[in-house]
Structures are given as structure tokens and as C-alpha cells.
Amino acid sequence: MRLEPLEDPDPRAVLRALRGALLGTGPAIGVGMIAARPVEVAAGTAVVVTTSGSTGIPKSVVLSRAALTSAAMATAERIGDGAWLLALPAGYVAGLQVLVRSLVADREPSIVSGRFSAGAFTAAAATMGSSVHGERVPTFTSLVPAQLQTLLDAAEEDPATARALRSFEAILVGGQALPPSTWERAVASGVRVVRTYGSTETSGGCVYDGRPLGGVGVRAVDGELQLSGPTLADGYLDDPAATALAFVRDAEGRRWYRTGDVGVIEDGVVRVRGRIDNVIVSGGINISLDRVETVVRAVAGLETAVVVGVADERWGETPVVVAPRGPALRRSEAVQLDEARAAVQEQIGAHARPQRLILVDELPVLPSGKPDRETIRAEVSRLR
């Protein structure tokens, strides 16, 4: 079966090609492909998604028609059916799934025009009002935390944005952990947020508010979360070694995806603690930067902060907090750092306290909306 790289990133071009790929009337498509080259893929393949991810390591994930549609139907079963608004890049799995859900529901998606902004989102949401047999059609969208933060900030000054946010039956938020303070703001504003967990290898989010979607299995093996079910990717394009490492089978033959995330399952609820590989060694002690970041983001003004590890002559490596400048909080940068250090010491220990706080005008992000941690780490290292 032929795979055609899709060079046009326009969402409507992706939608047209995706319709044929899902129905089997057109070739499989490659989005975000590193090299625009025609290749052969297995029958049943719909999309190959190539993304650098947040660590800068390229991955070409092979997704079948069955996996994508299974994920879309499981989402509808969990949160309901309706119309979708695309506010994410169509070349990444979260945006791609908005289009898949629309095709499965046989509804034309609304699309945020141009670069994402509160104004563009509000205008697009305003066009979604429709009804069938006199009943309003529920609306849904998918965002990353930074987008939700932008919209909540705008909603404080613009009633139209506030109404737009409240108009959605559910807003899926994923791609990275949602800071508790942002979630609390959304709830207080009447915004119905669903926190999702998953990856390109699972056809997008497959755990909603800690509970797996229908057909999805979850287990923790030596502390690592693993996922199974009909939404799993077939593997990585032309990379059998990486596929064998990431996708394993248990004694019963069931296939599992190794997420690389540390987590626990408590009373059926999945709790993600961070990345196995996002760990530094400082003074001989392992420190999870994800855990430090979670604590730091609870400090007022640091809700979207990123914590990276940088070289240190004395300790080997130390955590550094990088955050965008926000509204004046009548607290100096030094006070914010002291509060972050105190919170980390209380919840993790003195060894994990961040050494510095660096405020920037804007955090570098990937096209998917996730922080570009490699670029942030490199820029911090240059500042030292």
C-alpha cells in the first residue's frame, strides 16, 4: 500500500486526504513527514505521523484505520457525540483526532483560522451553533494547557470568550500535564474540562480524567505505565528495533505500549508521576524534573513554568525554572524563586530545590503546542 506524504499542512487539505485514507478509497497519508518520499506501508494503514516530540527525537508512528476510528468511537462513547472545533495543528495526533472524530460522526468540523488566538477561537466557536430536530448539537474541542490558559486569561476581560468556553460540552486538554491552578480556574469559570492522557502511539488521548476509555487496558510494570487496546499504533515506520522495544506482548499474547511514564493505578484511576527519562542526578541523588515542575507550577505566577536540568560544577546537574513573564503579582522574581524552592523542599526535599528562576517573554514551543524543552535547555545553558 502506498503512503503519500502530505506537504500541505492546511487543515482542510488534511481533512480531504484523511477522508480517503479512513474509507480506504485513497492512499495512506504521511503528516509531519521528515522526508517527503513515497514508501510502502501495510494494508489498513491510514496515517503515519512523524513528530519530533518534546525531546527532539523523531518518530514516525504508523496508525491504522481501525486504531484511529476505535479511538474516535471510544471518545464519543465516553463524552458524547456532536460537532468538533479544530484549534490544534492537523499534523499532530490531537488535531488529527479532531478531524477523525468529525468524519466518524459525519459532521464537518469548524476550524480556527490562522494562528491560534483568543479572538480567532471565539469567532470560530460562535459559528458552531446548530440543532437537529429542534435539539442543540453538543460541541467539543481539544486544546493544550497553554491554549486553555490563554483563553481563561482573555475571558476575564472579554465576555464573548467566556461564553465561548462555556458553550462546549467538553474541552479535552492534553499534550502535557494540566497545572492544578489552571484546572481550578476553568472549573470556577464554568468550563467543562476533561484531562486526557495518551500519545501518538495510542492514537491520542485514551485515558480521560484518569480512567481508560472503553477497550483500553492499563497496567504498571516496574513503575512504568503501559497501555493496551484497539487504539494502539502498528509501530514505527521502517524501524523494527524501536517497535519491538516500545510494543511488547504479555504471556497471553496481549500487546502493550510502554509509555516511558512513571505512574500508579489507584482504585482504577491512572496517576502519572512523570517521565522515566526526565531525571537528573544532582549530588548523587536522582531528581525527577517532572515532579519538581508539578510542584513549581502550583506557585502563583509560575503555572506554565518549565523545569530543565543544567550542568553544575558542584552538583553535576541542578534544576532551573523557566517561566514566561506574567501580569505583575507585586512579588519580585527573588520572592517567586524562594516560594518555589520552599514548596519543592517541603514536598520533595532540599536536594530537589531549583537553583534559578529565569523569566522570558515567551517560552519556545513545538508546533504541537508543547514546550520545546530541548531549545529551552540549550538557551538556559548558554546563559550560564
Image: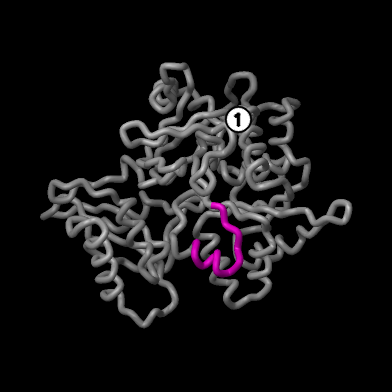
- Colour scheme used in the picture? one colour
Whether residue 205 sits left or right of residue 356 in the image: it is right
Where is residue 39 drawn, in percent x and y?
Answer: 58, 23
47, 347: nearer the viewer? 347
Instruction: Give the residues in magenta.
Output: 183-194
Q: Residue at x 59, y 78 (%)?
A: 157
Quarter holding residue 117 = bottom right
Give the farthest residue toward the front. 267
Q: Residue at x 72, y 25 (%)?
A: 24
Question: From what the image shows, is residue 329 above or below residue 295?
Answer: below
Count how many numbered circles sit on residues in the image.
1
Element assignment for label 1:
helix
Q: Pointer 1: residues within 10 angstroms few (<14), some, or many (20+)?
A: many
Whether residue 347 is visible, yes or no, is yes
Q: What residue did someone put label 1 on? A: 67
Q: In what quadrant of the picture does the N terminus appear?
A: top right
Question: From what the image shows, is residue 213 above or below residue 273?
Answer: above
204, 16: nearer the viewer? 204
Amino acid type for the residue under numbered disc 1: Ala
Question: From what the image shows, is residue 262 above or below residue 23?
Answer: below
277, 270: nearer the viewer? 270
Q: In what quadrant of the picture does the C terminus appear?
A: bottom left
Question: From what the image shows, is residue 39 above or below residue 203?
Answer: above
Q: Residue at x 45, y 30 (%)?
A: 257
Whether residue 362 sits left or right of residue 124 in the image: it is left
Whether residue 9 is visible, yes or no, is no
Give the farthest residue toward the left. 314
> Does the segment drawn in magenta span residue 258?
no
Where is residue 285 drawn, in percent x and y?
Answer: 16, 47
Quarter holding residue 131 = bottom right
Whether residue 150 sits left or right of residue 219 in the image: it is right
Q: Residue at x 41, y 64 (%)?
A: 303
